[in-house]
Amino acid sequence: MDRSNQKPQDKGPIAKPTVTKGRHVALLRGINVGGNNIIKMVDLRSHFAAMDLTEVETYIQSGNVVFSSKHGDKAKLIKTIEAALSEAFGYTARVVVISAKEMALVVTEAPPGFGKQPDRHRYDVLFVKDPLTTAEALAQIKPKPGVDEAHAGAHALYFRRLISKAAQSRLSRVVQLPIYKNITIRNWNTTTKLLAMMSK
């Protein structure tokens, strides 16, 4: 789970970004968490570049790799990245790959007010990996009334929880669900930062 503590700023309505064709982000699961699967970002960038991917950048330590690719087949791209990382770092790599166009949609279709009260709520975006759909994920992740709110978008779930009652939130229970292997979580600030990195 992404634990970046940077707070988003309310800059009014989100303008529709201009995204760059061929730009993607790979969201890695389960690295640099609890002392497991420790990977240095410099090594991660090096291995992505070795896959004939260009303009490779990383953001914080939770496994966010922005890159450009000439290949339009996302399923093949995911398979290539997972195989290369599994071999290079000795773990079973699972990644969610989101195109710049898809990430723009993730940001623009967020529920009204999402990310606007960082002193009151925590905002997380749950990206799903095929074959899991956001509707299927939402049906299994049952928000706690009065604490949590969750909404499904095209490529991700939007999860808001009260900071004052965070210990009661059901978001932490997602790790116990079978669908967790097909979910990776980033906070809202990280999500919008990644879109900025993918846009021109």
Image (spheres, rainbow, N blue to C red):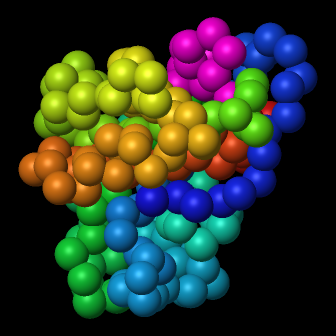
At 51% from the left and 34% from the top, the residue drawn is: 161
At 46% from the left and 30% from the top, the residue drawn is: 147
Identify whether 73 is placed above or below 38.
above
Identify whether 10 is placed above or below 179.
above
What quarter of the picture does the N terminus occupy? bottom left
Residue 55 within the segment the image draws in magenta? no
Residue 113 within the segment the image draws in magenta? yes
User: Can residue 37 be seen?
Assistant: yes
Q: Is residue 8 rendered to the left or right of residue 84?
A: right
Q: Residue furthest right?
A: 11
* Place of residue 78 in the rendered image (x, y in percent of width and height, measured from the top left): 30, 54
Q: Is residue 132 rendered to the left or right of residue 96?
A: left
Q: How many numbered dots are placed on residues in this image?
A: 0
Identify whether 49 is placed above or below 113.
below
Assign the magenta stretch its main secondary structure.
loop
What quarter of the picture does the C terminus occupy? top right
At 44% from the left and 77% from the top, the residue drawn is: 33
Identify whether 189 is placed above or below 41.
above
Q: Is residue 56 rendered to the left or right of residue 9?
A: left
**Front-most of 95 and 115?**
115
Q: Residue furthest left?
A: 178
* Place of residue 189 in the rendered image (x, y in percent of width and height, measured from the top left): 69, 43
**Front-most of 188 and 40?**
188
At 26% from the left and 89% from the top, the residue drawn is: 90
Q: State the extent of the magenta-drawn residues as a range.
A: 105-115
* Place of residue 34 in the rendered image (x, y in percent of width and height, measured from the top left): 42, 82
User: Can residue 101 be seen?
Assistant: no
